Image: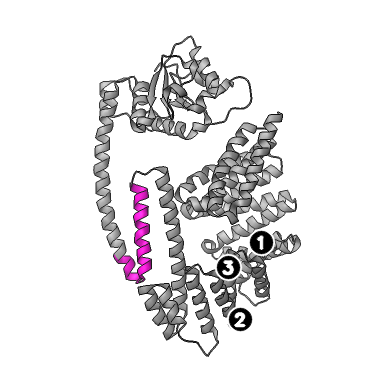
Amino acid sequence: MKMSYTYRAFISYSHKDKVFAVWLQKGIENYTIPTFLRNKYPHLPKDLKRSVFRDDEELSSASALSAVLEQALDTSACLIVICSADVVASKWVEKEIVYFKGSADKRPTYTVIAKGEAKDVMPKVLGDEVLAVDAQQGKKMALMKVIASLLDVPFADVWEREKREVKKKALIRLGIGLAFLLVLLYSLVQYNAISSNAELDSLHLNMSSIEYKLKRTKLSSDEVYTLQKRLQALKEMKKRKEDTLKWFGMVQTSLAKKAKKVYDAKGVDEALAILESEKSQLEDAEYAKKNILHAKLYIEKNDYKKADAFYEKAITIDESYANIYEYVLFLMQQNQTDKARVLLERLNAYDLNQEQKANVLNRLGIDYRKLKRLDEAEECYADALKLRKALAKENPDKYRLDLAWTYNNLGVLYKKIHELNASQKVHYKAFELRKELAKKDPKKYTFYVTCSMHNLGELYREMHDTQKAESFFKEAIKVRRKLIVSNPKKYMPSLANSLHELATLYVKTKRFEEAKVLYEEALTLRETLAKQNPQAFSNDLKKTREALQKLQHTEVLE
């Protein structure tokens, strides 16, 4: 490469092929040039980091290339065109090719076919003097061909080294696999030492197996998605069983202990049969707990109607905070918000400790806000905030997340009543607390940080600060894209929401092309979610469809 060139390559592509373009750029820039190649060809660098230019932004409706793009094209040693049907239809890719080929300094152009037949996906302005690499025949080989061309060395030299690396990695994977089996056997022994529940042991083994496949096995995107969904379902089942076991530990009767042994060995139905074989004559606190244990077992069976009946019976016998609050959480999960609020208002009159009082007030604030009883909501949040500040001062690790949620809820309320400066202040407090927590435990708290980013994006959009709004939305989307890989079911709704809201911002600023791309991605996610759970996600899907239709109508008028 001549010293005057800043980049070894400029990647020209349709933004519908962005995933492929990112893969190619990372593949090139992450390639470490082996010592034997540098010894054989002394002109080679150690690596190709920061050697590729790829425009990461959608182009606007301007009629000519920007000065930034022209400068990047002028300072690139070659042009790589990613070919697909979308590229053929892209006027911007055509402009980049024409500009590059029009340079007095003749430089090579390479094409990489992402999808489709060569005759159908090669832009006509390219002509015939190009090196075509078909990634459909093997992405690894295609990448190595491109790298060999960029380094100006024989492909055979690059490919031989790659084959040796593949063999080496295979041996390493074999060793890791054997090590994993030993660890798995050890963990099962340890796990069995603390759990004798047969179904829980089976869940643990299945989860470990799926996690190993996801980490160590080469899978297609569909296979990864299927396994992730299965893993999430197993985690939910495990959580339910652990909750049931917790309540078995709280019911100290001989019958419950007998049912526990049967539950561990044979499962839910047999345990219920034993619990229901004897009717207690003493309707005391212990009997109330037994009814909640019944409810937990029916939740495992997905029989929520019977679970509700046992919760109702439990709080009729013993109206303690623990029993009522447990029922409130169940009702909220079942979207029975009116019934939950009545119970919360009853609890609010109880003589509770600081933590209990803060929990009740915070949840009441959420309900009052949804009912537009905004003064009452603000009063509840303010009282909860005072209590949680004191708790977080005494025990930061335990209560800082709760404190952050109350700040967050206040921020949402203040935005609703158009007190935007007050909303900004408390949203930033929530943001800072969550960032501190995420530094210590990223896996547990990173998602909460993205919630603050999203909320600040919505707030700044309301304040007409487009630059800050866009920045927060983009960062939330960036992090949520990473989170969705580990747990699609949990994070897909949030990613779709951020995509939709950023698209709405772009519409307001007349960046229609960028808005369209984001709406389309949000629509795809929400179609998947609505298919899985129509009741929960149909309204969101309708909202994005209508926004996209309105945008398309606007574009026609423009």
Seen at 46% across and 47% down, the residue is 485
The location of residue 183, given as percent across then percent down, is 29, 57
Q: Mark 3 sits on what residue?
A: 329
What kind of residue is marked 1?
Ile
Question: Which badge, 1 or 3, comes first in the chain's sequence?
Answer: 3
Quadrant of res 189 = bottom left
Element under disc 3: helix
Residue segment shown in magenta: 189-216
> CA gap, disc 1 to disc 3?
13 Å
Element under disc 1: helix
Please report contact status of discs 1 and 3: CB closer than 8 Å, yes or no: no
Is residue 54 at all visible to an observer of this figure? no
Q: Nearer the viewer, mark 2 or mark 1?
A: 2
Q: Mark 2 sits on what residue?
A: 316
Seen at 44% across and 68% down, the residue is 241
Magenta stretch contains residue 512: no
Quadrant of res 460 = top right
> CA gap, disc 3 to disc 2?
17 Å
213 left or right of 307 in image: left
The location of residue 207, given as percent across then percent down, is 38, 58
Q: Nearer the viewer, mark 1 or mark 3?
A: 3
177 left or right of 245 in image: left
The location of residue 370, given as percent across then percent down, is 69, 59
Q: Main secondary structure of the magenta part?
A: helix
Most foreground residue, 257 or 182 = 257
Question: Which badge, 3 or 2, comes first in the chain's sequence?
Answer: 2
Q: Dividing the image into 4 quarters, which one contains the C terminus?
A: top right
The answer to whether 5 is drawn above or below residue 433 in the figure is: above
Q: Mark 1 sits on what residue?
A: 366
